[in-house]
Amino acid sequence: MKVFERSAKRGNVYFHGKEFLRSAACWMLAAQLAGLPFASAASDKPALASSSAPSDPVLKAMQTEMARATAELGKTEQPPYYLSYTVYDQDFVILVGAYGSLLTDAVAQRRFADVNMRVGKPELDNTHGQSRPSGVNSGSLPLGNDQDAIARVLWEVTDREYKRAVPSLLNVRTNTAVRAEEEDKSPDFSKEKPQTHIEEAPAAAPFDRAAWEGEIKRLSGAFRKYPQVYNATVMIQVQRSNSRMVSSEGSAIVSPSASTRLIMEAQTRAEDGMDLLRVETFQAPDTSGLPGETVLAGKIEKMAADLSALRKAPVAEPYDGPALLSGRAAAVFFHEVLGHRLEGHRQRDEEEGQTFTKKIGQEVLPKFLSVSDDPTVQELTGVKLAGSYDFDNEGEPAQRVEVIKDGVLKNFLMSRMPIKNFDQSNGHGRNQPGRMPTGRQGNLIVTSTKTVPEAEMRQKLIEEVKKQGRPYGLYFDDIQGGFTLTTRALPQAFQVLPVLVYKVYADGRPDELVRGVDIVGTPLAALTRILTTGDEPRVFNGICGAESGQVPVAAVAPSMLFSEMEVQKRAHEHERPPLLPAPGFEDAGAAKDAQMKAEVKP
């Protein structure tokens, strides 16, 4: 996975398949939404296509077609033992500005459906195996409340999935017969109690589109003052969503939601060709929860100053020694290094590394650390958490799961795919529309009983540096993301991608900003080197990509002191910075050329 808070411009993409590179990125929502078909661009603000009340005609059409499909397919030789329909409504406004003008000004509306089907028996069905050859099929649904039109599309998608599922079941049975016996013989699907939850969508929060168009222009225009900022955008995305799910087991769940995200991004390039990026993201249920324009303008100034300093900073050398991670950096570290290895399906798939599969009841972290995943928490430290939800994508209620208590492994994050000794879901079955749900993180929260005041953590780092006889330690202040490898076919390694890194010297010299390093290592070794933590948890919100697609997540952790942390040089391109000066800065460019010519004279 990766946890990212940056743009997709420079090839930081999600990888799927056996390599299982995981990614999480706050910016990825914007990238996803940019590719959605626009159904309307005339309205000034989004409005959900239909009500979510019990009389909802869309829900009624889903239930009617579900009953008909179940009855008719029940007459076949291979009837489905489970069928569900999930319909997603998404209405949103996207404004993107660059250098004082708008690049995008659009209203979009989309409705689409997932049909999830299982044939065979819970003990062995068409979804068996991590490759997920079948189980879900998707299609775009008509907008509005025409029940006949909606039913027609659901019928077509259901038929299409059934024609995939039956041959897939035959392949599964054949493969099971000819392959060696699996170590984990758990069923493919758990039996759960049907859920009913019909939540009516609240009134839409006001969104002054004209006012925000002006603010996006002003904020993005502030980057024009900085000639060495080569790419800069400011984006706001306001979204209202409604998810409806019905199943052949009798579940009926309607869950509306609303979110607003503001992303400011700026990029430059050092003389050696290394691209440097700064991103600030803000998330709230509506625009009233976002910072004011004065605060945002201050953030832009800080981003530009950071980029200027990074351009001049030396490239750091490979290092292995004491390190201090800020709370946000530690949160990403735990999401990547630990969190993905605690997702339930990874304990069963024999292509996975199964780092913690047989460590239940064993100490896997220092005793002063505990870890839970709690999607029911909406906010911590005054920050809204991106991984919050009431019901997972399989219709199970969200639950707080204490995965590690006082350093000892207790549990895994479970979908409805059972694993040995864990037969039931704990509300962590999650997926991007169009993918099969798997056990995924929501809000991963790290707590500590061995803390020191945040202001003392830097001194603790210096003390550890002196103790080890090192000239300096590293402080990781901010981070753009990371990824981890969990499959057996590749090394069980992780990589965390810092943005602001400082050398902290033992002899009292000022801290030195450096660039071009990534944190690397292996999980079992890295997790044992935590010495102490700060007392102020910090939040990292993002979008995480894995086998079941991209889902919003949050990670929360205090700053952490490590006795040993390894970093390597970051790979980068060698394209020169722009040869022409930025528009309006021609005089500065001519002065720089004259200076360079003077410096090369014999």
Image (spheres, rainbow, N blue to C red):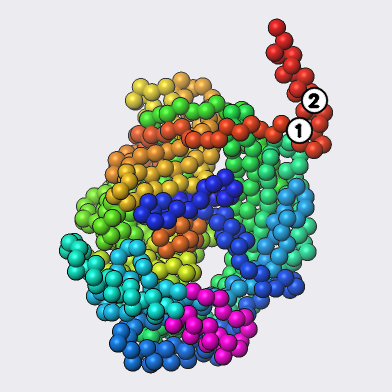
Q: Residue at x 74, y 73 (%)?
A: 43
Give amino acid for label 2: Ala
The part of the image, by quadrant, that contains residue 591 is top right
Q: Nearer the viewer, residue 487 or 347?
A: 487
Which residue matches tag 1?
A: 581
Proximity of marks 2 and 1: CB atoms separated by less than 8 Å: yes
Q: Is residue 179 left or right of residue 583?
A: left
Tell me if 360 is positioned left or right of 473 in this view: left
Q: Earlier in the sequence, mark 2 or mark 1?
A: 1
Look at the image and say whether residue 335 sits in the magenta stretch. no
Question: In the rendered image, which residue does mark 2 sit on?
Answer: 590
Q: Position of residue 79 (x, y in %)?
A: 32, 85
Magenta-highlighted residues = 138-159
Viewer-proximal residue among 22 and 410? 22
Q: CA distance from mark 2 to mark 1?
A: 8 Å
Residue drawn at (76%, 33%) of the image: 581
- Residue occupying the far top of the picture: 602
Q: Residue at x 51, y 90 (%)?
A: 60
Image quarter hosting the C terminus: top right
Looking at the image, which is closer to me, 425 or 596? Answer: 596
Asked where in the image residue 150 lies, by quadrant, the reply is: bottom right
Q: Residues within 10 Å of mark 1 (few under 14, many from 20)?
A: some
Residue 45 position, x and y percent, is 71, 71
Residue 455 in picture, x, y percent from top left: 48, 38
What residue sits 44% from the left and 82% below the top? 159
| 429 up-or-down from 520: above or below | below
Q: Is residue 81 visible?
A: yes
Residue 452 visible, this orientation:
no
